Image (spheres, grey):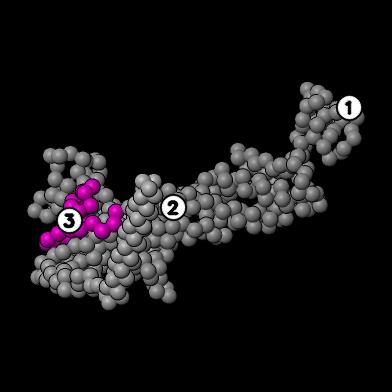
Amino acid sequence: MIKIGTALFEACEELERERGISKEVLIASLCDAMVAAYKKHMRIGKEVTNIEAILDEQSGEIGVFSTKLVVDEVEDNDLQIALAEAQEIAEDVEIGDEIKLEVTPEQFGRIAAQSAKQVITQRIREAERNLVLNEFLDKKGTLTTGIIQRVENRNVIVNIGKTDAIMPQKEQIPGEYYKPGNRIRVFVLNVKETTRLPQVIVSHAHAEIVRELFELEVPEIEDGIVEIKSISREAGYRTKIAVWSNDPEVDSVGACIGPRGSRIQTIVSELKNEKIDIVRYSEDPVEYIVNALSPARVVSVDILANDEYAHEAMVVVPDDQLSLAIGREGQNVRLAHKLTGWKIDIKSVSQMEKAEAANFQNYEEPEYSEDIDEQDELQQEIEEEMNQQAYDEEDIQVEETVDEVEDIEE
């Protein structure tokens, strides 16, 4: 046995406190390192499975042991031991029992220590990696709070606990300044498994951040009374959110706004004064589109296509509401499209009137061409000839009948 003292156990306890790696994992790693070092030292194949290391926590000693089967006649010295030899170690042993023999080589401490250092270091990394992976796999798709560490190659590095997460440029709010040391609320977008620590991707521009903030600030949403049906967001500029109340007595929009706008104001402040439009969800596509285009007023909505392949609608608004309905650079109608899933074409009243007038002027009564007239005349002549021919044939038949009658009378 090799005396290692209590320092190892103190180090294991410290690692458990600091990094969350259990003491049992570290001790198991040490034992595995001892076995690996012994097999390498004795030139024993890795496939041999009857070698193990045992650590006595009370005495602070560790040793390598070989498990052998007690038999009458030994055929394999590595796996078997004679009964007489086994009884010298343990008197009550019988044939068919297994006995553990210490095989720790002399001067093995230095070799074991070198091997143990490598294995334990590797196992600590693996344990940390698994801890981080399991923790953030559970947090994937949720909101978490972190501290901005630094900015590297336009990527913001955010510490979110046991690891540093990466916020790519496309997941950042345009124009936002990310100052190191500031706290930030981010959405855990993805967790990628790597050979080292898992790579956690977070977002500050994801639409689900708005959902999480509303769930935190609006008790009716957390209780399931008010339901968020859809969210469309252009981070840093504007967000539209469609809500629905499962209780007729609860106003879904009013619940999200809160008394004197307290709830919505808290969320707007968290999002750095990003504009938020709260609209009522409706199963009627016409009503839903009208609500989604707010604050613009709508005159009419004409459904052009509503099937599994396309959802298209024509919306008419007053002339003074056209720019408001479309929004700056098309933002309002674009967000309404994302919110409802409908392709929306917007026209003003005067534009529709001009289009209808143009269509009316372009309409012409069908005219008959000279070719058609000539064909009609030809058809008429053919019919007259056919009728005249039929009359002639009748006259001939009548004349023949009269001649026959005259011949009979004579």
What residue sits 25% from the left and 41% below the top? 224
What residue sits 16% from the left and 70% below the top? 360
User: Residue 45, position in %: x, y?
Assistant: 79, 49
- Residue furthest to the front: 410
Q: Which residue is mark 2?
A: 136
Q: Amino acid at mark 2?
A: Phe
Q: What's drawn in magenta, residue-wise?
A: 280-306
Q: Which residue is mark 3?
A: 291
Q: Is residue 25 visible?
A: yes
Q: Which residue is mark 1?
A: 72
> 356 or 399, which lies in front?
399
Q: How many marks?
A: 3
Q: Amino acid at mark 1?
A: Asp
Asked if the residues shown at circle 3 and circle 2 are in contact, with their CB atoms under 8 angstroms apart, the answer is no
User: Residue 285, position in %: x, y?
Assistant: 23, 52
User: Residue 36, position in %: x, y?
Assistant: 72, 50
Pointer 1 or 2: first along the chain:
1
Q: Mark 2 packing: few (<14 Cα in 10 Å), some, or many (20+)?
A: many
User: Residue 284, position in %: x, y?
Assistant: 21, 49
Would you say residue 303 sits in the magenta stretch? Answer: yes
Looking at the rendered image, the disc whose residue lies closer to the viewer, 3 or 2, is 3
Pointer 3 or 2: first along the chain:
2
